[in-house]
Amino acid sequence: MTTLTDAPEGQFRLSMLLSDTRYRSLTLQAIAAIALALAIFYLGNNVAKNLAALGLNINFEFLGAPAGYDINQRLIEYTSQSSNFRAALVGILNTLLVAFLACTMATIIGVLAGVLRLSNNWLVRKLMSFYVEIFRNIPVLIWIIIIFTIMTAVLPGPRAFRGDDATSSMLFDAIAFTNRGIYIPAPVWGAGSLVVVLTFVLSVIGVFAYRRYATKLLYDTGRLLPMMWPSIAIFFVPTLLVFFVMGMPIGLEYPELKGFNFKGGIKIGGPLIAIWFALSIYTAAFIAENVRAGIQAVSKGQTEAAAALGLRSGRIMSLVVLPQALRVIIPPLISNYLNITKNSSLAILVGYADVTATLGGITLNQTGRAIECVLLLMLFYLVISLSISAVINVYNNAIKLKER
Amino acid sequence: MSDQSTNSIAFVRTQEVPSMPPPYTAAGPIRWMRENLFATPLNGLLTLVALYFIYAILSGTLPWIANGIWDSPSLAACRDMLDGASGACFAVLTERWHQLLFGFTYPSDIYWRPTLAFVLFFFAAAPVLFFDLPRKLLVFTGLFPFIAFYLIWGGSVFTPLLALVGVLAGYFVYARYVASNFAVGFLGGIISAALVWWLGGFVIPEHEITEGAMRSVPSRDLGGFMLNMMLGVTCVSLSLPIGIALALGRQSDMPFIKYICVVFIEFVRGVPLITLLFVASVMLSYFFPPGSGVDLFIRVVIMITLFASAYIAEVIRGGLAALPKGQYEAADSLGLDYAQSMRLIILPQALKISIPGIVNVSVGLFKDTTLVSVISMFDLVGMIRGPILASTEWNGVYWELFGFAALLFFVTCYGISQYSQWLERRLATDHR
């Protein structure tokens, strides 16, 4: 006699495909696979029929053809004779540029606002929660348009800077806010400027080396070296010395009003500013909430225990609270960066030539290759998102509590 | 020394000293200010900076609002009336409010229809939002989609009626069989609903109603804030069941189903909504059978629903993962099958945990409905940027219009998030 748990071998009946849990999952998966295949076939068939009816086909040759339109904001060489692929590349670089700028600024504003929301100053606390609530609850699209409107409709035209009765003047005689963009001084690299830059890079490395050495010395011998003043000295002194010894090789070229417009300096276009600032202040509101939650997540006992050990308040922050808070703050911070990158696609609204505006906008409309353009566009964003998620996963694994 | 000390007791207090009020610096508003505004020099500086900041904003905006002109035919007339003084021209709102709310082609004599639908929406949402209300009210919630469809689109009353009958048939079949077998009930419900709709297609008279109070309105005439509300409400409610299914699929032991769900969720979450809207506007029509001509509103609803369901799936997955493993094991040990244990044990608890996350996604989605203005649908932002700012009368009125749009969104989104916080406190059953 067999025990009850022994499955009857060799007695497979067709009904077991549904009633026996060993086979049911296979049945279900097979059904799902068939349904998926049917759906794909149905949709693919529809696409083929529709395209045939319109006399279209899917190919990517248009990428090699001349784009035929100009792009104002570009980081690499591009003319209207360049290929559509080149235009897409310009767009990709512009997307990455605005994403990088906005991430940096959003982090700075967000961390500041998040820390200030925990300040014991009542007014500042209220002001910051006001900021967070206002910016979180109004669509980023409206913020982009509002800032773009400030840039184009409120700022004066270059003409207002002209003559003796000028109604506008440049900030510090160096920065001009006009409705065509903001002009800032551009650095002029003279002979020997390379040495200065090199010195600067070396001194940055020097700061890190010094801090590492000081930490090692502290752990090995218990001797505590001063950190702040030597770091600042290493950061500034050598570079300034070399700068003056070499005879000030790096100068600034100031923007000047010539004719109808400003010449010289670096021009930051209105669309770039709009999308950059809007994304920064909008996302910073979310980051502020993350930072606040992260700091509050560290239990009060940790601070008190550190104080009981005799640590000063600065050290409590840097050695006990922050390492634990960062564990909570950084994953949502990175996903906010991802949101910035995705939201930068709204740049199309203000005419900033990001990849959505070039590949998904003008190229799509001019060539009529909707399917190809949208697919390529999605592929680009997908690659970015998946790489950022990979970074989050790596980080999460690295900081996971090591339980023994 | 000791005798001296005994003698030195010259005075022994027999009465209690009456307590004095604290010094004025340590009580009342001054103490509060010292503690909360000027605790340290740096803090004091911050307070001054904040005060200046508030002053700068208020001194700029308050006179502008107070001087506002509410009655004027155009911006030029407004400027004449202001005569150089700083002041808002709110006349654009009184003049064009109907376009901002309903779009510029929705017939003005039937504005009461969407307004009524909007009012009824609160009655339909109330039993879902507040659990204390009698459960019988949920019947109205179930009826609301059909009523709202009829009110907003109008046309033949038979279309929503047929849809309702189909849903009812499906529901009765589901209720009849779900006790014995979930799969049979579910599939039977879907099939019978589809059957009713298909058969009803032959019975219902095909005629367009173009006259009268309940005449039909094509979807391209929808616009303004109404469009944002409709997209937000429709897409969130549709994406909930899909999101639950995706979340369960992602947790499944069956590798094929799990893979489909993971790929779908990661794909949708990886691309910006705007590319999905491009798909809706230029690509999606290729996927339908030739000549079906699905209108843009439905295509946009499909894409936004897919978008939202991926995010909601992730929120619910978090809820499922946060549930203690004992709950799953308890359900198994009671002998419940998968559908029963999910329906009766797991999902009620998991959904409760995920409510704040779902509300967050909903608020984000509602804000993102403004993106449809990029594919030239005239929602609130689209109306402002398109017809109103392009008109000769109101070209140049930026702040009043964008301020109005921002205010509408702020009130809605802030309200929803306050509700979510209230609910979170309400539902916190474990930490009391």
Image (spheres, coloured by chain):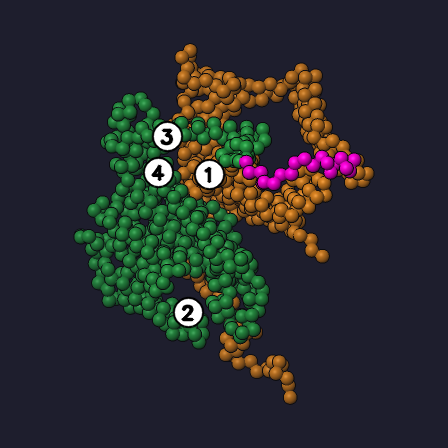
Chain colours: A orange, B green
Q: Earlier in the sequence, mark 4 or mark 2?
A: 2
Work out whether A37 lies above or below A313: below
Q: What distance separates the C-alpha of mark 1 from that of mark 3?
A: 18 Å
- The residue indicated by pointer 1 is A130
The answer for which chain carries disc 1 is A
For the record, the magenta segment spans B1-20
Given this view, does label 3 or label 4 mark the residue nearer the observer?
Answer: 3
Q: Are marks 1 and 2 in contact (CB under 8 Å)?
A: no
* Residue A123 left/right relative to B193: right
Q: Which of the two residues, A55 or B205, is positioned nearer the viewer here? A: B205
Q: What distance separates the C-alpha of mark 2 from that of mark 3?
A: 59 Å
Work out whether B63 lies above or below B373: above
Query: Callout 3, which amino acid?
Result: Leu
The residue under the point 41% across, 69% down is B186
Query: Callout 2, which amino acid?
Result: Phe
Instruction: Return the x and y of residue B35 as percentages of the image width and height.
Output: 55, 35
Instruction: Return the x and y of residue A215 as percentages of the image width and height.
Output: 75, 37
- The residue indicated by pointer 4 is B404
Q: What distance separates the C-alpha of mark 1 from that of mark 2?
A: 48 Å
Given this view, does label 4 or label 1 mark the residue nearer the observer?
Answer: 1
Dot 1 falls on a residue whose secondary structure is helix
Q: Earlier in the sequence, mark 3 or mark 4?
A: 3
Q: Is residue B229 visible?
A: yes
- The residue indicated by pointer 2 is B186
